[in-house]
Amino acid sequence: MEMATPQITANEPDIELPVPAYLLDHDDPAALFSRLQRVVIHLELLQSEAVQELPISFRDFVILATLRKEPPPHALAVSQIARYTLRPMGSISQGLDRVERAGYVSRSASPDDRRKVIVALTPDGIRFADRALETYDAIRQRVFRHLDSDDLDRIDTAVTDLLAALDADHLDAGGRHGAKEPSA
């Protein structure tokens, strides 16, 4: 397979990473998806790095981070957590079990609808989430220092558009990516 060594940015001309040449074909939609997959792999590695010293997985960290970003009392219904994190209810329930056992969240019935479960960060959960978010933010800053503000703006716009397309596809597929159209 032919390999290329693209220049990463004008700010860092000495960095060379060998990548398959087909990833550099900007006219090929398949190459775009391959580049996006490579981004996903890098993000997964960075996510693993962010939690390597923590007693939780990144997926469980996302639950805590989602709650921490809510205004006080840092609480959401389980269904909202699942919707915000694009995870099935079963997966969220298992993650909530783990972070509840660790003392980071508490669950209670909604005062408006006793069938609905509300999850809130505990004081320990707030402190833990803040420390974990600081670690994740440091990693994010480390990556973003390789990009200037114009690059970040362009990426943000493009990713926002891509997310809108992915969200539309998710809804078109009945909430499941890859779902087949019903036969007539």
Image (spheres, rainbow, N blue to C red):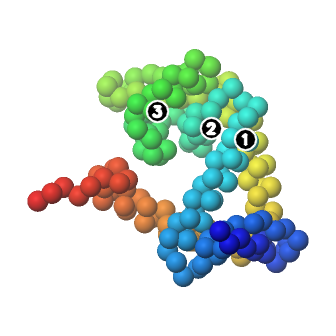
Would residue 81 be visible to someone looking at this image? yes
Kind of element beneath mark 2:
helix
Q: Decide which of tag 1 and tag 2 comes sooner along the chain.
A: 1
The residue to which callout 1 is attached is 50
- Amino acid beneath label 1: Ala
State if disc 1 and disc 3 touch (CB < 8 Å). Answer: no
Q: Quadrant of the C terminus?
A: bottom left
The residue to which callout 2 is attached is 58
Q: Is residue 39 above or below residue 112?
A: below
Q: Position of residue 155 (x, y in %)?
A: 63, 70
Q: Position of residue 53 (x, y in %)?
A: 76, 31
Identify the disc placed on residue 92.
Answer: 3
Q: Quadrant of the N terminus?
A: bottom right
Q: CA distance from mark 1 to mark 2?
A: 8 Å
- Amino acid beneath label 2: Phe
Within 10 Å of the Cα at label 3, are there few (<14), some (14-19), or many (20+) other Cα atoms?
Answer: many
Q: Decide which of tag 3 and tag 1 comes sooner along the chain.
A: 1
Nearer to us in this view, 143 or 135: 143
Look at 35% across and 54% down and name the residue there.
178
Q: CA distance from mark 2 to mark 3?
A: 13 Å
